[in-house]
Amino acid sequence: MFKVALFGVGRIGVLHGRALAAHRAFDLQYIVDPRKEAAEAFAAEVRATAVSADEALSDPQLDAVVIASSTDTHLDLCIAAAAAGKAIWCEKPLDLDLQRLRQNRSALEPARNRLLMGFQRRFDPHFRALRHRLAAGEIGTLESMHVISHDPAPPPVDYIKVSGGLFKDMAIHDFDMARWMLGEPVADVFAMAANLVDPAIGAAGDVDTAKILLRTPSGRVCLISNTRRSGYGYDQRVELYGAKGRLAAGNQHETTVERWGAEGASTDRFENFFLTRYQAAYAAEVDHFADVIAGRAAPLVGLDDAEAALVLAVAADESVASGRPVRL
Amino acid sequence: MFKVALFGVGRIGVLHGRALAAHRAFDLQYIVDPRKEAAEAFAAEVRATAVSADEALSDPQLDAVVIASSTDTHLDLCIAAAAAGKAIWCEKPLDLDLQRLRQNRSALEPARNRLLMGFQRRFDPHFRALRHRLAAGEIGTLESMHVISHDPAPPPVDYIKVSGGLFKDMAIHDFDMARWMLGEPVADVFAMAANLVDPAIGAAGDVDTAKILLRTPSGRVCLISNTRRSGYGYDQRVELYGAKGRLAAGNQHETTVERWGAEGASTDRFENFFLTRYQAAYAAEVDHFADVIAGRAAPLVGLDDAEAALVLAVAADESVASGRPVRL
Amino acid sequence: MFKVALFGVGRIGVLHGRALAAHRAFDLQYIVDPRKEAAEAFAAEVRATAVSADEALSDPQLDAVVIASSTDTHLDLCIAAAAAGKAIWCEKPLDLDLQRLRQNRSALEPARNRLLMGFQRRFDPHFRALRHRLAAGEIGTLESMHVISHDPAPPPVDYIKVSGGLFKDMAIHDFDMARWMLGEPVADVFAMAANLVDPAIGAAGDVDTAKILLRTPSGRVCLISNTRRSGYGYDQRVELYGAKGRLAAGNQHETTVERWGAEGASTDRFENFFLTRYQAAYAAEVDHFADVIAGRAAPLVGLDDAEAALVLAVAADESVASGRPVRL
Amino acid sequence: MFKVALFGVGRIGVLHGRALAAHRAFDLQYIVDPRKEAAEAFAAEVRATAVSADEALSDPQLDAVVIASSTDTHLDLCIAAAAAGKAIWCEKPLDLDLQRLRQNRSALEPARNRLLMGFQRRFDPHFRALRHRLAAGEIGTLESMHVISHDPAPPPVDYIKVSGGLFKDMAIHDFDMARWMLGEPVADVFAMAANLVDPAIGAAGDVDTAKILLRTPSGRVCLISNTRRSGYGYDQRVELYGAKGRLAAGNQHETTVERWGAEGASTDRFENFFLTRYQAAYAAEVDHFADVIAGRAAPLVGLDDAEAALVLAVAADESVASGRPVRL
């Protein structure tokens, strides 16, 4: 069993913490959070100990850290954990500042093979099956793709203000998805964006609706469609168009129940909460982290992916600002 | 072009009449209906002449008749048309009285190869494709099947009273469908029926809801599910279960439009009118009748099918009356 | 935490054992299985102790038992556990012999409110939602229903021989489902059955394909369709037809991935393994058992349900034998 | 009945000619095509007379013309027909040269209320229902939309060479669709395009794959996705995203037949031929043209729409050439 420390007991930290506590491969020892009471309450729940970051990282028995603290702490914690020789599972993003990330990459290089970035969609069984079947040649050569990524409802504006904006906060998952499927680096980025959902988001200097086009050197084009508010739950679809057809992963409904009435047929609600939508993905991610620590697997998504997705987000921001495509 | 007379200008007669008038293979010459004004009005619309049955049948140039008059006239008109050497397309049922039908079969035998029974579902492209793919072995040997046949809403009770009852009037189509798919004669019939939809139907001595089981000698079982009122439009599905899987023909919606909202996904309405639902079937049936008259095709559904479906309806009535299965 | 003993470490016993071991409300203490090595191996895995049935039941600290042993031991173990005052979760069936079950009911009566029968489909979120929406009046009064229950592939014939036959072994789940939805007792049972899938099943005296009709006093009819081999995975659907429409729970696919090609659109495989198909149901069942032990809930499915489902299975057997409907 | 002349007996001309010949509101009198034999053969089929364009237009009894001749003749024929006072139904495009079209608009202005442009998708019942439900407010304010428009297979390269290119030939329908739904003029156009399907198309100077973004002043963005080869039939979908949800019109299958097997569920083929896919649209278009001639309706799609769609196609060409968005 690997001894592990959890940084951050917000929503996603609690999710990971409970999974680690129940997992056979892990021994969740430390809980770290500047909010003392929260840290201690959660430590009690999972039978761990609330400590400071230094205390956790200085334990030579500790194998790994899970970083689910606030975004602005991610990079420093990763650097410290890397220096201490710990395996790292860090929630996205690694950092919101591309310059800063690049300046600090050398400090993270030693951890490259033991640093897992929390792009959980790569572990979703639906998207994994999609990727596998694309690679198996089911639709021949990929020619274009669509990533529809519409959230159920916008987050509070206070979150928007510190989020880094639509592209770094939300589309970052979709940039990673696009990179995973495209099989080629992205050469050109163009984005159109607007503030249509909530004027408060615009007042905070952000957009809430966007269409992004990515192009690879061979001419493959990927559309990413984002909105902060779908009005109907999680809409997270990926459509791949190839020489021999189309492969797509669709949305999930809460149950299979269907009603037929005078107005037609209607399904049950769409999944409306990301923790439920990505439940299987999070579980698979924990398993994979155990494999990474054990050296049985290289991280499926890591340092280079974190930087590359951020590069695309920055380019999308630039494209919106200039009104022109950005060549990478 | 074949010269043809139409008997009956009710809803289905008008449908057939317009199709015949627009069809290249037909010259619709005579309209026959005891309701003079209706006959003449429709004759004017399609540029035909309103005449009596005798006048029509005694024209030696007349090739064929289409019988869409009231049920109680079908058998006599068929006999007269057969005697006059005309090709016949007769709406179902040939007759409601099995004894009477059998007593008069000899008079119809000469027309056997030129008598088409109006079980239009055999011409529906969906059910035809289903039958074709079953025959092509896509699911191996057929083991059981379900025919779901739910009407949108019950007809007026005045119609119920002269309809012959649920089995002879409505399930008769499903008996024919079952016979078409089963590939074996039916040996046993069991039915459970009730009056659940409209008390007036019960007061008229009929049922409005039924489940029927048919069994063939080899053990294949077919379920027929009937109700006079689905509450959601035409529900006319056929499901075939074989050694290698399932083949099914489903329902049709008015359009492909779909809405996604907080309550889930919802389709457009189901087709709600049999003339719309079976539009393609009726068109194909007219084409087939031209082939039958020309001698290019034997009737896809004919005299034996009319009798066999009626036998099953009578057996279902007996089963409900006795509470026991009926062996044929 | 409730101290619990597990009887039987076959496939379903291991499933329940692991769930109990990981569950916060349970402390899995004892593993009982006549196959010593298997018992000890599983006890080691879940950090429990392998003991005899007597040892387990004589521990006054033990709160509850989970009975997943071979069918012929269920009733005796339930009686012993009831006598020892333990809460009981017993896999179906309670017994295959209706007479024997009735003779021993008095011994089980004291455990009535603490005896949960393992009809796991009642805990399936899809069927629960269906039941809830029926009860909420979404389709008005229920008029008829269909339970399609087709297994992916037949079990080994050795299992068939001790299974009690198709109705007691497989359709028993569907009888319980029908009872749960119908809202009225069943008055009449009629079944047609055949040996179409595997001649070895017929040689063992059993059938593998059946259609069953159940009727309630008010005239509601339920169809149950069974086959031991669908050819396409688990087909477990429930369709409810009411005065205002239709409600149905459908099948589950392994992923949402869909392919469009020259042959049309195709989904991913259907769920093909009952432990996967009913994963959420089993998890909910464990939670419910904790509530039952704690006295927070009466068993959602219990002693009366076990007997009533067996009554229907016996009637179906009689109907096949006599060729006639059976009145209860 | 309106006397009408048909110009052009290619595939679409023959389709319209047969519909006009069978339609109660029309008397198809003249067939005009420089290929004499083809004109005479079709004239014989529909009982019309093959004449020259001048002969047709100089008949004062002639009410209307249907122009389905080669693209390069459309504008001149429209001008001549307008000068002769005839109602006009002209297949798209009015012309491939925007300058030329603008220079000649004054000659067409007098026919404005009697000139119907053949964007048949506006008459498709599915897209009409979509438009109607958007206008009815079912998803609140439109925020973005996707038009997926993938043809089954590329046309011959000889056609590509005279087609005007992907945007003027194929996307022109999608530009019209976008304009119809957006409810605002398009302000910005950006396109990425490539030659991925067939090198011969690239050798002919054209592209075969494109993603186009259109933006309106209020910030609504429309994606158009085009490929000359889907590999799975007609893929013509429109997805509307609004403040309260999503409305979409989907693809059509040849039948409702579905197969369930070990690999999952599979539908029948997608419609693979535009004349079949848009059969209902073409029929509705003929009806509408009768209403236009009779003065009962203004053209649903006319002169301004022809020019506006061409403006967008030209802008898309410019965007691909410059690599930048084009502001209109």
Image: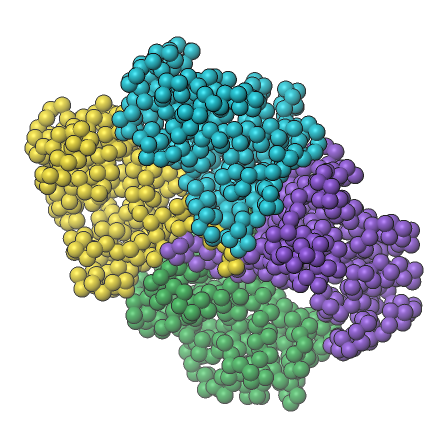
Chain colours: A purple, B yellow, C green, D cyan
From the viewer's perspective, is C60 left or right of A117? left
Say if A192 sits above or below A274 in the image: above
Quarter of the image for the N terminus of chain B: give it.
Answer: top left
D319, A295: nearer the viewer = D319
Q: In this view, does C27 lie to the left or right of B287?
A: right
* Image-quadrant location for residue D281: top left
The relative height of residue C168 versus residue B248 in the rendered view (above or below) is: below
| Front in this rendered view, residue B286 or D66 | D66
Query: Residue most toward the bottom?
Result: C60
Residue ID at (11%, 32%): B50
* Any part of residue B247 in sight: no
Residue A56 vertical position relative to residue A121 in the rendered view, above or below: below
- Point 27% across, 29% down: residue: D24
Q: Is residue C7 in sight in this rendering?
A: yes
Q: Going 46% across and 44% down the picture, which residue do you hit?
A: D131
From the top left corner, tell me how far across and down residue A10 is, in percent.
73, 68
| Residue plotted at (86% across, 72% down) | A52
Residue D152 image offset from top left, x and y in percent: 54, 32
Q: Nearer the viewer, residue D14 or C243?
A: D14
Give the camera-side residue of B306 and A137: A137
When the figure is inspected, residue D285 is found, relative to residue C178, above or below; the finding is above
- Where residue C25 sits in the image (x, y, percent)? 65, 79
Residue B37, percent across and down?
A: 11, 39
Left or right? Give the position of B31 relative to B270: left
**Left or right, residue B312 beside residue A116:** left
